Amino acid sequence: MNRQTKVILALVAFFSFPLGKGGVGCLFAQRIPQAIEYTEIYDFIEELTSDGVISSNAAIKPYSRDAIARMLSEAQSKDSLLNKRQRDDLQFYLQDYALELDTLPVYSSYGHRHKTQWITSVSNLSLADPSLHILTKDKVFKMRVRPILGMDIMYNRKGLITHRWYGAEIQMDIAKHLSIWGSIRDNSWKGTDYLKDAYFPSSYDKIAGARITQPGYLNNLPGVQYKEANYGGDFSDSRGGISLYAWWGAIGIQCERIQWGDAQHCSNILSAHNPAVPMVTLQLTPCKWFQFDYFHAWLPSNVIDSTYYYNEVHQEGVILKNYRPANKFMAANMFTFMPIKYIQFSFGNSIVYAERNVQAAYFIPIAFFKSLDHLLTKGVNTQNQNSQAFASITVRPTDHLRLYGSFFLDEFKFARLKKSNKEHNPISYLVGFNWSGWPVKGLSLRGEFMRSYIACYSHSISVLDYTSNSYNMGHYMRDNSQSVFIQLSYRPVRSLRLTLDYTMDTKYRAYDYVRHNIAGTRVPYPIIAQKPFSEKIWQNDEINFRAIYEVFNNCYAHVDFTYNNTRAFAPTSERIEGEDRGWNADGTSMELAGDELVNYYLNKYSPVYSQGKNFTVTLGLSFGF
């Protein structure tokens, strides 16, 4: 027996050992994550939690499909606490999570069904919800196959933009210990044929104009990595993973978007704003009042390593160097305690590092990474890696009310808290509330406020920024900014949700992280000693009404009416060293002023399609999310 076989058998035995009550008979079902873009199920879970029907850990997302199924099953056992609309919603969502509950969905009430029984398994092929479900009679193999198809059409005074996507997903659970899943979505933005040339003076502006998400844009849209396209932008979104699990935890390899920190609009710890990245994950849930999460991720740095390249014979006698990106990794952990039903407290730490190879020390799940960093780098006085600490708290003082907050510490020194110290700690904090279900069931009012100080999420070494694919992994507004979000939401009937949002995002003076003051320059103190929130350079006010209706499971239609006012401002104060007021093509700084500086900030932080005052109508239909 070779070493690999021994390792596999040991892992299987380890996860099969009947620890705790019930042993194998108490195993949870699969550990397949439910993508957080599928907001309807998350909103329903939050409603049930606010009403005191179930409990959920809002600080760590995505939830697994098994966890959602168990929460829905718990709500079903307490259906006397639900009104008619909630019971209808509950039965509706239970169909989508039927396999997790060891049964097949039944769509006869709102679609056609074809059911076949094989020798050892039962299958369900639905035409209403285009999907195939397979469940063996002994329930040791489950599989779900579902196509993905969708399109959004957006129109305002600048023209028409379409976003279409298609693909498929497959989910399998084997022997109640192994989950395998995968999905692919091919996406395309198009719009340049319909947009007026007056808004796009160059061909590059036309391409960028049809792209409403870019790493530098200050909007809450999911980040993507574009492929080459001259009409807008194409990108693919491939996710998946494999997980070995038992009732008390799971270990796996996956490529997914994750969110850490309780937030309704956007988290300031890990927001899932960046594209999905591959990672090794560990989750432990040994009891109801404690959960531990850890991952080690491989991040695309988008920074060239000038010492790492391939040689290519470009033409006879000419060798072309193809430079490769620098390596970039991240390790993070989060401890969540729920000492009583109405309080949840989470804390953890992370490190972004850029060594040539992965560092074994950062595979220690329960570790304080900054201490390990000092151990590994201080001996020869090399530059530290980029470490962070964070915490999230959720309090439900009464049914229907949820109060929450999260704190992100990029750097912290107690000396900076003194009034005599002009430096500010680069931190971010977020507070919010959700009042739901009273006096009207299905009605909720939410509010959220976020502030991030200068240099939060950034680093003086670019490859160590708190970014992946150049997208900020924390709040999309990045540093020296604030965000206000208010939402009124109502669910009048089954699977229909109406929302009215107001968002005000403000970006203040922009700086590169110049760590120390430079003799003979105009920097009297380091960048972090500059006054935060002093002069705004960009602001967006947005009011959005959305009606979204899930026709059947994972098929929904929506219509949005959005008014926004995006504008920029030129600071009146004198520019200091390290302040961003424009850049030349060779990377040297400029000192733009007036309208030129206003246009620079507008184009840097917002897509052309949303600049100025706009009224945008969006229509969308999707199978999948």
Image (cartoon, grey):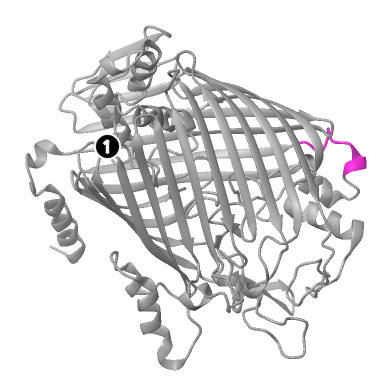
Determine the residue positioned at 16% across, 39% down: 27
The residue indicated by pointer 1 is 173
Question: In the rendered view of the protein, which quadrant contains the N terminus?
Answer: bottom left
Given residues 154 and 571, the one toward you in this image is 571
Q: Inspect this view and state whether residue 625 appears.
A: no
Q: Look at the numbered disc 1 and give the secondary structure of its residue.
A: strand
Q: Residues within 10 Å of mark 1 (few under 14, many from 20)?
A: many
Percent position of residue 597, x then y = 86, 60
Q: Does 37 appear above or below 82? A: below
Determine the residue positioned at 50% across, 22% down: 555
Q: Amino acid at mark 1?
A: Asp
Q: Is residue 195 magenta?
A: yes
Given residues 410 and 202, the one toward you in this image is 410
Percent position of residue 532, x then y = 66, 64
Rendered image quadrant of residue 370? bottom left
Q: Does 518 appear above or below 131? A: below
Percent position of residue 463, x then y = 57, 71
Percent position of residue 554, x then y = 46, 25
Q: Is residue 82 left or right of residue 267?
A: left
Determine the residue positioned at 45% across, 49% down: 405
Q: Inspect this view and state whether residue 499 appears.
A: yes
The secondary structure making up most of the magenta span is loop
Rendered image quadrant of residue 586? bottom right
Q: Is residue 447 left or right of residue 388?
A: right
Q: Is residue 407 magenta?
A: no
In the image, which residues are magenta? 191-199
